[in-house]
Amino acid sequence: MDDPTPARLSGRGDSVAGSLGGRQLAALVTGPSGTSAGYRRLAGAISALILDGRIAVRVRLPAERELATALNTSRPTVTAAYDLLRESGYAHSRRGSGTWTALPEGRTPSGVTRTITLPDSAIDLARAAPGLPEKTLADALDQIAPRLAQHARTPGYHPYGLPEMRAAVADHFTRRGLATLPEQILVTSGAQHALTLVLGLLSGPGDRVMVENPSYPNALDAMRRARLRPVPVPVTDTGWDIVTTESTLREAVPRLAYLIPDFHNPTGLLMPERERVRVLRAAARSGTWLVVDETLAELALDVPAPAPFASHAPPGGAGQVITIGSMSKTFWGGLRVGWLRAPSGVVTELAAQRIANDLGGSVLDQLLALALLDRAPELFPSRLAETRERRAALVAALAEYVPQWSWKVPPGGLSLWVDLGEPIASALTRRALDHGVRVEGGGQFAAAPGVFEQRLRIPYTQPPERLREAVQRMATALARGLPAGAAVRGPHFIA
């Protein structure tokens, strides 16, 4: 039986911290086809998972026979893969103790480097979220002070969210074209919190969840921690593969589908209206819950802001669509306020589930969010203009310092999905960190290991001069050469 305990980083020596069952590891390494044929592909997939931080160090791998059975492959294939992992420093073995994961000397899992505090001179391009102007924050604090004093005389617990915040979010949906009542809104501590609540209520270990490939890393991590089985569908430079999406909904019948149709993270693409209708129809036929992330929907830079995804459903057809939103991308990530829109009965169940975790969100944060939402018509045009200016500055810097890279300018959102022309993203991100730039390689956004190694996501949320400096530093890192053999080459990670 698979060990349900999450694997953790352990202490010293040959001690191990938990183990992976054969079915657990098979679910992590298999791609959309359900297979991981070839020992090099298998070894590469496991290595990539270790580097991504999705498999911890010093975790015991399943026995060769057990993994071979789970993968429906031969035992010699698994034996050869484990041998390759040991030769490359990604595994150690000892007679009687099995095989456990490791890292070659000098390597750090990318999931760990994301949490390292950078020096003041460093430029952080790993987070696609804007800051909040000081005056805007000060004005909002002055505005809410009397209301905060009134709330301070109450217990302050609001599992559904402040009533006035729920009403404001409902009104916002209605103005965007989707009639919404306050009882259809749950205010959460950010969009990630909303997604975690939905996963906990509507799915269980082993359930399939359809995801875009690439997709938002924190959402993918939440699904893996919930022990769900991601079923990837491609998002390419030209958009969504809707035929594959429809067939996946029809044949895999996933319990949930997680989509980012508005200025998709990381590609910046906008799903056309006719494709939204097709996805809604296919999901309705399969009985799949659609979880639609609209945190970027209002960051429309070159096109009109899209209407809510659920507004394209036929009358009464939005009953299995849950829409997630947040203040983080439009205003400030430090304001931990998000929301979800769902049928009122589902909102009630989610609020009951939420009480077990945090009893309710911060009253202060919600009042600040309300004040900012009230001023959105005044504040947002300048925010969009600033974002366009920063996007242009990033594009200009890339064209000057790394003209061999390529990208498409997205019609909205907060980042470029840059093609490096060769599979060097992992090596480049490590070397860039040495030059004072933290940036995410494409593998972080992959729903299956070993892909998008030729991509970087570069946000344009920093001031123009900082963006220019960051690109110049990355170009310097590239010019000085990357470690030999450091690139992940698709399924052939280990040469």
Image (cartoon, helix red, strand yellow):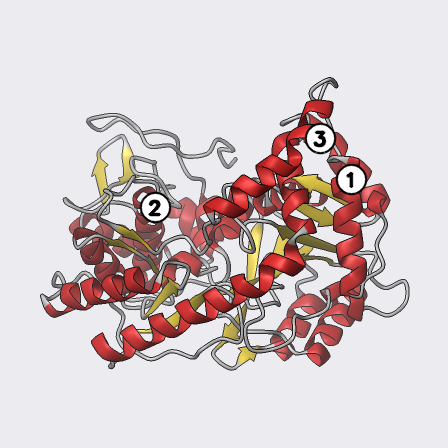
The residue positioned 18% from the left and 47% from the top of the image is 89
Q: Are marks 1 and 3 in contact (CB under 8 Å)?
A: no
- In this figure, which residue is indicated by the disc labeled 3? 147
Q: Classify residue 216 as left or right of residue 247.
A: left
Residue 227 placement: quadrant:
top right
State the image coordinates of residue 335 (x, y, percent, origin top left).
55, 41
Residue 355 placement: quadrant:
top right
Question: Dot 2, how many residues are within 10 Å of its Cα: few (below 14), some (14-19), or many (20+)?
Answer: some
Q: Classify residue 241 as left or right of residue 473.
A: right
- In this figure, which residue is indicated by the disc labeled 1? 164
- In this figure, which residue is indicated by the disc labeled 2? 114
Residue 248 higher or lower than 113, as above or below: below
Amino acid at pointer 1: Glu
Which is more N-terminal, label 2 or label 1?
A: 2
State the image coordinates of residue 184 (x, y, percent, origin top left).
82, 47
Residue 59 higher or lower than 37, as above or below: above
Instruction: Identify the image quadrant of the C terminus.
Output: bottom left
The residue positioned 75% from the left and 19% from the top of the image is 154
